[in-house]
């Protein structure tokens, strides 16, 4: 649509211009007038604005002071709950800044004596609060968390904080009054300025001014609101981070859901316990995805889960047992607890905790099995098994064998715990009480006493106990066995009687042996003197015949004389061996340390002529010392080496090897030869008196040598033996006591 000018438009322009010029002139005059007036009013406005800004700064400083104290209190509580020094960072920052804030307040209100006095009171309260916070932290560090929390629950800190809030509120109230007054003065100045501006300016300028003023005011308020929202958001984010950190450090699983059932937060411990990641639930119906089972194997419905029940009904669930099948076929047992979180009596969230009790359940089952095995074992043994508490003197357990041995019921011990001791024989009661009192607290017990059964029968009891200690090594139980040893006591009495009888018989036998030994000594003396005298006479006359009448005797007579001489020599050797054998039964044997090396060397010297005659080769290893009777051992080794040289085929050089081996508390001495050997069936015979396996014409001897060896070794507490095969040599050994 096109607009065309009216005929009168041109006529109105000059008028409008004049009006404009007039208006401009008037406006200029008014502006000049208003400028002067505005200058005066502006000075007053500026002064009032400064006062308003000053008041705002005081109010802001008060808010920051209160905020710092809240941060200090929050940091302290975080530290008390968690025990982590990182939670003290807000506290440390606050205590370093709050005094500066108060000093700033004193400077800002220096022109107001009433506010100055209020700030002095506030500073005292703040100092008291900081001292309370520091004291609680020190108690946490020195006396532990429970002592610190106990002090926290005393509400002393809350009372101080409430007082500080009241003091700050009082300061803020005064500043708000000043703010209202100064705003009123500022507004009056501005109104006066605006009024002068209205006179000289158009309504539009006034409107623009008003709009500008309102816009500026709105921008300030928006900026303040945005700053406050940013601060609150930062605080909320910090609280969330602290909460998440605390949850991750909990030793148990934990999860938080909002009032719709949506998972807000959960820790890794919960995932570890469940064996899988937490389900990202969006609603309460999603909880069925956990696929948990009741203890009886029934699956959990969504509405049965503790978190859902806490959100829907406000129920507090404590340690409800869940079973979670695992991928490997095993099953985890978990206790879950849940509690609702309320704000203004309305449920806004719920918290659940998870405890893995799989090992606990396994241990409980093992304990039940162990208890059952213990009961079966205790009931199966024939002795009375008992457990005693030395701290209170109470009998904790007694096995069923008690009824059979004591003749009393176990139930009777419940009414009379000391009933078992009342059955003790009167003659044994005092001794039993003293021994029991002296030993039971050490945990060791070994007492024999008699009891009298209700039927009057007397039974002997051997009571033995041993200590059971706790982890600190303290005796907290004594367990023992009470055994019926009546039959053993009867046997011991019989054995004692037999021992007494045997001892009497031994004494009688000893007297008889002493008489026999006396007769043996007389017989040995008779052999040594009465029998040897005719032999010496025979030898003397035979030698005289050979020396004086040899030329008058023919060869047969010479041969007979030789037979007489050899027979006399053999008989003399036999008598000597018999005397040696007899002497071994009478001589006093006292063992002492003896060097086998010196004994063997001395024996070789005595046998030097035989060794040289036979061209025998003797090899000897290094030998140890033993406990022996030197003369007796000398006789043993001489006989063994002599036999080793003697019993060898005529065309073979005798070879003898002497060595020893240690074994525990004994020393084995071996004499090994390359002789004619001994058949296994004859190896026991050769150690008997007068036992010979070969004729005297082949291997001369008396048949007593090895009997002397056995008797001598046995008198020294040892043994003797031989290992041999015919035509394969022999290995004679003697076992002697090792040197102590």
Image (spheres, rainbow, N blue to C red):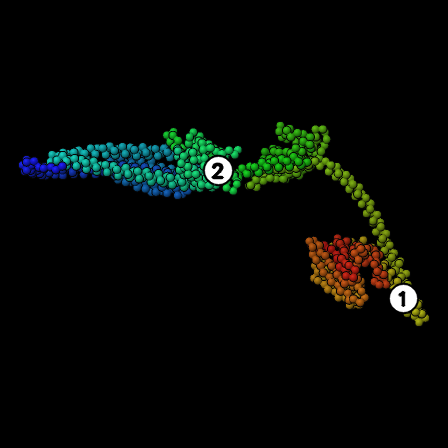
Image quarter where the C terminus lies is bottom right
The residue under the point 77% across, 59% down is 725
Location of residue 147 with respect to 673 vertically, above or below:
above
C-alpha span from label 1 to label 2: 112 Å
The residue under the point 29% across, 32% down is 170
Q: Nearer the viewer, residue 397 or 197?
A: 197
Q: Nearer the viewer, residue 89 or 588?
A: 89
Name the residue carrying label 1: 562
Name the residue carrying label 2: 355
Image x and y of residue 316, in percent: 45, 31
Spot the residue most to the front: 1
The residue under the point 85% across, 55% down is 524
> Which element is circle 2 on?
strand
> Which element is circle 1 on?
helix
Query: On the rendered structure, is 58 left or right of 153?
Result: left
Q: Which is in the foreground here, disc 1 or disc 2?
A: 2
Q: Which mark is residue 198?
A: none
Quarter-wise, where is residue 34 in the image?
top left
Query: On the rendered structure, is 318 left or right of 134?
Result: right
- The answer to whether residue 207 is visible is yes
Image quarter where the N terminus lies is top left
């Amino acid at each position: 649509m096109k607009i065309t000018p009216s005929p009168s438009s041109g006529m109105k322009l000059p008028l409008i211009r004049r009006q404009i010029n007039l208006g401009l002139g008037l406006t200029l005059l008014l502006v000049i007038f208003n400028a002067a007036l505005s200058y005066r009013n502006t000075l007053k406005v500026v002064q009032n604005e400064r006062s308003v800004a000053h008041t705002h700064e005081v109010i802001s400083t008060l808010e920051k002071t209160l905020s710092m104290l809240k941060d200090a209190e929050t940091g302290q509580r975080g530290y008390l709950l968690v025990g982590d020094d990182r939670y003290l960072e807000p506290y440390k920052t606050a205590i370093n800044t709050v005094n500066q804030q108060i000093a700033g307040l004193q400077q800002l209100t220096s022109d107001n004596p009433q506010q100055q006095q209020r700030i002095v009171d506030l500073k005292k309260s703040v100092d008291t609060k900081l001292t309370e916070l520091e004291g609680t932290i020190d108690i946490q560090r020195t006396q532990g968390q429970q002592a610190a929390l106990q002090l926290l629950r005393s509400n002393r800190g809350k009372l101080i904080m409430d007082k500080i809030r009241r003091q700050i509120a009082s300061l803020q109230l005064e500043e708000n009054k000043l703010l209202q007054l100064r705003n009123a003065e500022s507004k009056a100045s501005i109104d006066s300025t605006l009024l002068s501006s209205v006179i000289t300016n158009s309504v539009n300028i006034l409107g623009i001014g008003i709009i500008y003023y309102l816009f500026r005011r709105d921008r300030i308020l928006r900026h303040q609101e945005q700053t406050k929202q940013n601060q609150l958001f930062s605080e909320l984010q910090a609280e969330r981070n602290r909460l998440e950190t605390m949850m991750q450090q909990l030793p148990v699983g934990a999860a938080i859901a909002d009032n719709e059932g949506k998972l807000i937060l959960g820790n890794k411990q919960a995932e570890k316990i469940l064996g899988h990641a937490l389900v990202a639930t969006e609603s309460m119906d999603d909880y069925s995805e956990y696929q948990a089972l009741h203890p009886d194997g029934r699956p959990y419905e969504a509405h049965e889960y503790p978190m859902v029940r806490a959100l829907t009904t406000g129920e507090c669930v404590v340690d409800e047992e869940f079973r979670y099948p695992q991928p490997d076929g095993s099953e985890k047992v978990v206790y879950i607890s849940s509690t609702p979180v309320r704000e203004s009596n309305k449920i806004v969230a719920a918290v659940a905790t998870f405890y893995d009790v799989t090992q606990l359940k396994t241990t409980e089952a093992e304990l039940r099995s162990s208890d059952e095995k213990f009961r079966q074992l205790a009931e199966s043994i024939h002795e009375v098994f008992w457990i005693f508490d030395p701290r209170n003197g109470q009998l904790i357990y007694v096995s069923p064998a008690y009824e059979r041995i004591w003749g009393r019921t176990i139930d009777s011990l419940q009414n009379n715990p000391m009933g078992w001791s009342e059955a003790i024989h009167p003659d044994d009661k005092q001794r039993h009480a003293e021994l029991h009192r002296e030993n039971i607290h050490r945990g060791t017990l070994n007492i024999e006493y008699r009891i009298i059964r209700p039927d009057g029968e007397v039974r002997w009891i051997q009571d033995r106990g041993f200590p059971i200690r706790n982890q600190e090594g303290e005796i907290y139980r004594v367990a023992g066995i009470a055994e019926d040893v009546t039959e053993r006591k009867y046997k011991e009495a019989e054995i004692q009687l037999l021992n007494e009888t045997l001892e009497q018989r031994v004494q009688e036998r000893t007297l008889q042996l002493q008489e026999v030994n006396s007769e043996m000594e007389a017989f040995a003396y008779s052999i040594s003197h009465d029998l040897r005298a005719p032999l010496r006479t025979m030898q003397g006359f035979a030698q005289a015949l050979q020396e004086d009448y040899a030329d008058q005797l023919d060869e047969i007579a010479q041969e007979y004389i030789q037979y007489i001489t050899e027979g006399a020599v053999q008989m003399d050797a036999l008598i000597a061996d018999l005397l040696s054998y007899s002497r071994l039964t009478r001589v006093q044997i006292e063992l002492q340390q003896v060097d086998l090396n010196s004994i063997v060397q001395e024996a070789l010297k005595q046998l030097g002529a035989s060794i040289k005659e036979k061209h025998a080769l003797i090899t000897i290893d290094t030998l140890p010392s033993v406990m022996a009777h030197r003369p007796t051992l000398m006789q043993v080794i001489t006989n063994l080496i002599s036999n080793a040289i003697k019993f060898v085929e005529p065309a073979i050089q005798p070879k003898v090897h002497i060595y020893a081996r240690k074994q525990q508390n004994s020393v084995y001495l071996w004499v090994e030869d390359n002789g004619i050997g001994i058949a296994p069936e004859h190896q026991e015979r050769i150690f008997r008196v007068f036992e010979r396996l070969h004729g005297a014409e082949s291997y001369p001897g008396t048949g007593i040598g090895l009997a002397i060896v056995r008797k001598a070794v046995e008198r020294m507490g040892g043994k003797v033996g031989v290992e041999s095969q015919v035509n394969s040599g022999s290995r004679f050994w003697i076992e002697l006591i090792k040197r102590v």
